[in-house]
Image (cartoon, rainbow, N blue to C red):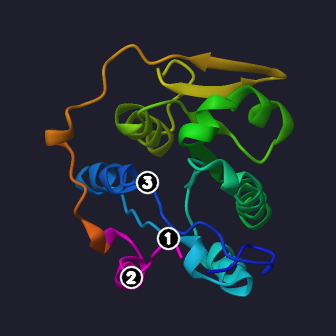
Amino acid sequence: PRTLDGSGRQYPVIPMGLFSLASILDGKGFETKIVNLCLKNSDEIRRLIQTTESKIYCIDLHWFVHSNGAVEIAKMCKHYHPNSFVVLGGLTATWFYKEILASYPCVDAIVLGEAEAPLLSLVQSIGSGRKFTRLRGLAFRDGSLVKAKIQTAPPPSLDELNFTQLSLMEDWEKYVRCDLE
């Protein structure tokens, strides 16, 4: 796998939580697909984003080395689909939510911390046209202000989550052969 600009390898391992998040959304009837962009070249990434119509694009920003790539993907999503909703999540996105939302208008919101409940609530709200500004576990812009509603409920037990629905990932057979070398 290469970085978005083709200059070198990018860390191809995704957090296992993406599988549980996708499984939750899929189980609630939302069409869901995980795409590991590190397994694609820059032309494939652009084509994929350009041809994938969605109301919501969720971008993982867990590993800090993906920061630039996550922002570039968010910019592409907004460029090709200006009326879409772009949300980031993950450790780095959570830690730097104020800076990201203040600096990058291509990002509409950031799911903070454990995302299982907030992401489902956000997707349900956007899907039904309801306001999402009261949801916990979410940071967003309100005019020029960055606001955050910290989640107070504990995350679900790991026993309640499904990390094995690999079929929700495009090219999962290729992904399971990735290593860190």
**Distance between the Cα atoms at labels 3 and 2?**
15 Å
The crowd level at tag 2 (other Cα within 10 Å; few <14, some 14-19, many 20+) is: few
Residue 133 x %, y %: 57, 22
Residue stretch rendered in magenta on the structure: 168-181
Q: Quadrant of the C terminus?
A: bottom right
Which label lies toward us, 1 or 3? 3
Q: Which mark is residue 15?
A: 3
Q: Which type of secondary structure does the marked residue at label 2 adopt? A: loop
Q: With 61 as the anchor, is 155 left or right in this view?
A: left
**Kind of residue at disc 2:** Arg
| Prevailing secondary structure class for the magenta stretch in the rendered image | loop
Above or below residue 172? Residue 121 is: above
Amino acid type at image mark 1: Val
Residue found at x 44% / y 78%: 178
Residue annotated with mark 1: 35
82 or 146: nearer the eye? 146
The tag on residue 177 is 2
Residue 118 position by quadrant: top left
14 with respect to 20 (left or right): right
Identify the mark nearer the N-term, 1 or 3: 3
